[in-house]
Amino acid sequence: MKQQLELEIAALVSRLFSADTVVELTRPDEKFGDFATNVALQLATAANMNPRAVATQLAAEIESHPAIASATVAGPGFINLTLTAAALVSMLQADLTAVNHGKRVLLEFSCPNAFKELHTGHLYQTIAGDAIGRILEATGVTVFRANFGGDVGLHVAKCLYGILEEIGGETEYTKIFVIDQAARPEWLSSQYVRGAAAYERDETIKAQIAAINSRVYALQAEQDHDSDLAKIYWECRDWSYDYFKQFYDDISVQPFDKYYPESTTTEAGLAIVRANTPQTFQESEGAVVFKGESVGLHTSVFITSKGLPTYQTKDLGVIMAEVQDFPYDQRVIMTGNDQTEYMRVIFAALASFDPELAAKQLHHPNGTVKFSSGQKMSSRLGNVTRAVDVLCVVSEAVAANDLQTRNDISLGAIKYSFLKHRIGGDIAFDLNESIRLEGNSGPYLQYAHTRAASILKKSNEVSTESLDAIKADERSLTRKLAEYNEVIIKAAEELMPHLICTYLYELAQAFNRFYENNRVIGDDRQAIRLTLVKIYADTLKSGLVLLGVPVPEEM
RNA sequence: GCGCCCGUAGCUCAGCGGAUUAGAGUACUUGGCUUCGAACCAAGGGGUCGUAGGUUCGAAUCCUGCCGGGCGCACCA
């Protein structure tokens, strides 16, 4: 409806003023109407005419449109449009899967490193990525969820060093098998912290850890599962992946289609770097680097002087692996915004030998999760707020009779509190205060849904009669409901779940206001109102589902 | 030093391909449950949109300088 009107008004402008313009309808304050446009102002400026006169002439023509109840001129020359009830109601039903039908998007996010614990940053990005995936799917996109994480590299060597120190050497490897399953993630994390601290403290240890790093690459290359170090490595690696999968299940995100451990991407990465040396990459001080200065970036090491691939090379490797597994139209890679320039380097390098593939890459950076004090969390210093801690604290704060509801509410609170912020900026997070159950929160929306569901439970008498007879408060609610499709499409285009949060909150407020002043059951207009309540409950529910927020029937 | 991002109400944030009177939540003050679920609703105070200029009929939104904060810049991921 919106798009159709925009085109028709553009055609009208073309006919009346022989000018080509792109007409954009905005959603003005309700008292002005359902849509507004400032074409008259643009037009008048360009043609040096009186804007109000242009607007008046246009409005008169627009008013004869069958979907338009009134078109009025306001202020300097805005045209405010009010739709007929029938037109408004016609916007309520639509299948959005045609919007991006056939489009294939690879979405890479979450990406935790093996041998380390999940922290709040992972929790945030996983929730955001999950929501984006669901939103894209709602508009017809085929989404492939990829999880790329480090199972080789210096962080692994640091952790292994910590383990060896803890158990007393490689020969003592059997000691790790007695560690209780539930304690494994935390145990690994503490060994990492120990190793990382030792690395910073002592040059000798630094060299030892570097040696372990090389050995891990070697045992990967040789598929060594028998040496003592290999036994420790593979066992702990499995612990990590089990832990990740369990965690994703616990927070109810869609499962990943494929995990790409870094070890499986190094070969392809090295091959592609070598194949494009010296055209794209050059040798420098024993290392293989990409000189980004020519495109305004910095030089970046892809293969170290010791012959080991850096994250850059592994990243090229994963790009190659992914596009082979899932030929895509676009790859969306989510990372922290501190990697923005780094991703530019990767894309610039890729563009120099595969511009077509490079053009399909889209970096979607997110901000850092910070405490209210503004202090950044660093897993390197062991000063983590672990993801599980967040879940626990919120769950404890939720008073609910049964466990399932309590879980739904705390997950809803956490997810919504993250998602309502625009992706890109930092997220302020306070375990005690940031997650609220009132106001603009997940539980508010869940509660709003249960109220509507409760009405519907009392009467199934949903009318099939036309909604065209809506009036006053009913129209207000309908108007808000009619915005849903536009919001989902925009959120999918921009990869911005917060647009849906804002909308759903406004929708719930609109309903709560309606509900406060308008009797549904027992009223003369029961049939028509029940129909609205049904549409409202369905709309709210589908929106929450897109965010990954649970929708309990009762709470 | 170079580059990128960010400064909107006490706090946390929307709005930022210009446009009708800058919005929410929270906190504070007040009113509303014998009536479909009060985790709700209504009302009030609170902002020279960091700052100084520029473009424009019109700027929180676009451009420039400055101030303040964050991040990145060769063998880490």
Image (cartoon, rainbow, N blue to C red):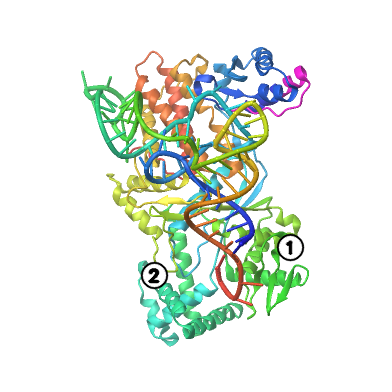
Q: Is residue A336 visible?
A: no
Q: Residue at x 46, y 53 (%)?
A: A124
Left or right, residue A64 beside residue A14: left
Q: Secondary structure at mark 1?
A: helix
For residue A184, which numbered disc appears in the image? Answer: 2
The 10 Å Cα crowd at callout 1, few under 14, some 14 to 19, many 20 or more, is: few
Residue type at mark 1: give it.
Answer: Ser
On screen, A515 above or below A335?
A: above
Instruction: From the top left corner, tell me how far across and down residue A182 is, in percent.
Output: 36, 66
**Label 2 vs 1, first from the N-terminus:** 2
The 10 Å Cα crowd at callout 2, few under 14, some 14 to 19, many 20 or more, is: some
Magenta segment: A10-26
Q: Residue furthest bottom?
A: A171
Q: Secondary structure at mark 2?
A: helix
Task: Give the spatial CA distance, label 2 vs label 1.
Answer: 47 Å
User: Circle 2 marks a residue in which chain?
Assistant: A
Q: Residue at x 63, y 76 (%)?
A: A304
User: Split into 4 quadrants, where in the image is the N terminus of chain A?
Assistant: top right
> What residue is shown with label 1?
A294
Q: Nearer the viewer, residue A445 or A47?
A: A47
Instruction: From the top left corner, tell me how far across and down residue A71 is, in percent.
Output: 61, 15
Q: Residue at x 61, y 20 (%)?
A: A76
Nearer the camera: disc 2 or disc 1: 1
User: Split into 4 quadrants, where in the image is the C terminus of chain A?
Assistant: top left
Q: Nearer the viewer, residue A283 or A241?
A: A283
Instruction: From the top left corner, tell me how far across and down residue A74 is, in percent.
Output: 58, 17
Left or right, residue A440 beside residue A354: left
Q: Nearer the viewer, residue B12 or A527?
A: B12
